[in-house]
Amino acid sequence: MEVLSLTQEHWDKVREIYLAGMASGDATFETNAPSWEEWDKAHLKFARLIARANSETKGWAALSRISARKAYSGVVEVSVYVAANNRGQGYGTRLLGALIAESEKNMIWTLQASIFPENLASLALHVAAGFREVGQRERIAKLNGVWRSTILMERRSTVVGTD
């Protein structure tokens, strides 16, 4: 397994994995995958990663700003997606670990994730990477007309923002 920078050339497979996550109903509130241009604009330019094995993209991870306010410049949201047939094989762990390392190189002090409570694998992945549950956001938004709750998780860096 190798972790590489995610570029536009990887977009078709990344989009396919993203769409499969959407179809699961427990990965995101999004219901349509954006174009490369929209996705590119919404995510930070660093810490865009793919996990590959045998020249095949198995998963991806990226960061997005939670706010344009300067005070929150070191607080970002995490996205980690693994192809359905590759889950439970360590790709998510490797991607999230690499994402944490890249975030700290770029002065990010807090990573946050908003996870559906039904997504037990994602919750376990984040806990194993040092995230803690901040709380549950009850009926925070609708997905396909149904109110859904999320669990807000965060990980504070032990390297950045410790002053």
Image (cartoon, rainbow, N blue to C red):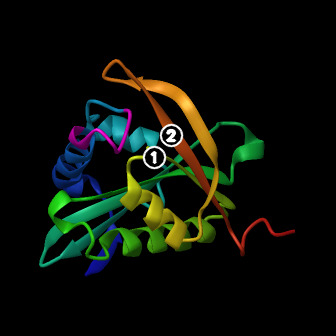
Q: Earlier in the sequence, mark 1 or mark 2?
A: 1
Point 30% across, 58% down: residue: 7
Residue density around tag 2, few if under 14, some if 14–19, many if 20 or more, within 10 Å: many
Residue 150: mark = 2
Q: Secondary structure at mark 1?
A: loop
Q: Nearer the viewer, residue 75 or 121?
A: 121
Residue 117: mark = 1
Residue 35: mark = none
Point 74% across, 42% down: residue: 70
Q: Quadrant of residue 159?
A: bottom right
Please provide the residue range marked out in magenta.
23-29
Q: Amino acid at mark 2?
A: Thr
Point 33% across, 43% down: residue: 26
Q: Nearer the viewer, residue 87 or 34?
A: 87
Whole-angstrom CA distance, mark 1 to mark 2, is 6 Å
Answer left or right for 96 relative to 135.
left
Q: Quadrant of residue 3?
A: bottom left
Q: Residue furthest top?
A: 145
Q: Are marks 1 and 2 in contact (CB under 8 Å)?
A: yes
